Amino acid sequence: MPEVINEPISVALWSNHSSGKVIPYSLYWHGRRYQIKNVGLHHMYRQGRVLVHVFSVTDGVTFFRLEMNSETLEWRLLDVETIN
């Protein structure tokens, strides 16, 4: 069961100008860097006029659900779950 975190984090991204895609490749949380090995689901929703992106990612050991506010460019770690 995921543990709710809902904290601001730092995220490093890859941007591909040809495909127009931007994907997270690592995140920094509590002084530790997590290398993202796989990006699963990605969806978007509107919160008023703001478009919010949600990414489900894993480093091979832990699942993370990340949220990026497209207006402020702030990232939040919504929840984490250890892979058993």
Image (spheres, rainbow, N blue to C red):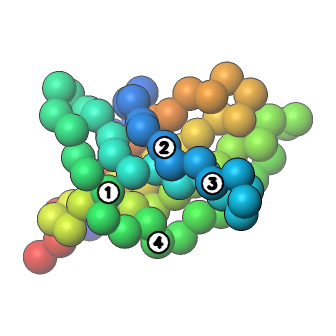
Q: Position of residue 9 (x, y in %)?
A: 38, 30
Residue type at mark 1: give it.
Ile
Residue 3 image position (x, y, % from top left): 27, 52
Residue occupying image coordinates x 17% and y 26%: 31
**Local SS, label 4:** strand
Q: Earlier in the sequence, mark 4 or mark 2?
A: 2
Seen at 71% across and 35% down, the residue is 70
Mark pair 3, 1: CA separation? 17 Å
Q: Mark 2 = which residue?
A: 13
* Position of 64 relative to 42 (above/below): above
Counting other residues with Cα less than 10 Å from the Cα at mark 4, is it few (<14), some (14-19), or many (20 or more)? few
Separation of marks 4 and 3 at Cα, in angstroms: 18 Å
- Identify residue for label 1: 36
Discs 4/3, front: 3
Q: Which residue is mark 4?
A: 40
Which amino acid type is shown beneath numbered disc 3? Asn
Q: Nearer the viewer, residue 18 or 7?
A: 18
Q: Position of residue 35 (x, y in %)?
A: 25, 51
Give the structural element (helix, strand or loop) at label 1: loop
The residue that mark 3 highlights is 16
Rate crowding at label 3 as few (under 14), some (14 to 19) or many (20 or more) other CA atoms within 10 Å: few
**Quadrant assignment, res 68:** top right
Q: How far apart are the alpha carbons under marks 1 and 2?
A: 10 Å
Q: Nearer the viewer, mark 3 or mark 1?
A: 3
- Give the foreground label among 4 and 1: 1
Quadrant the N terminus occupies: bottom left
Q: Quadrant of the C terminus?
A: bottom left
Residue type (three-letter) at the residue carrying disc 4:
Gly
- Is residue 45 among the parts visible in the rendering? yes
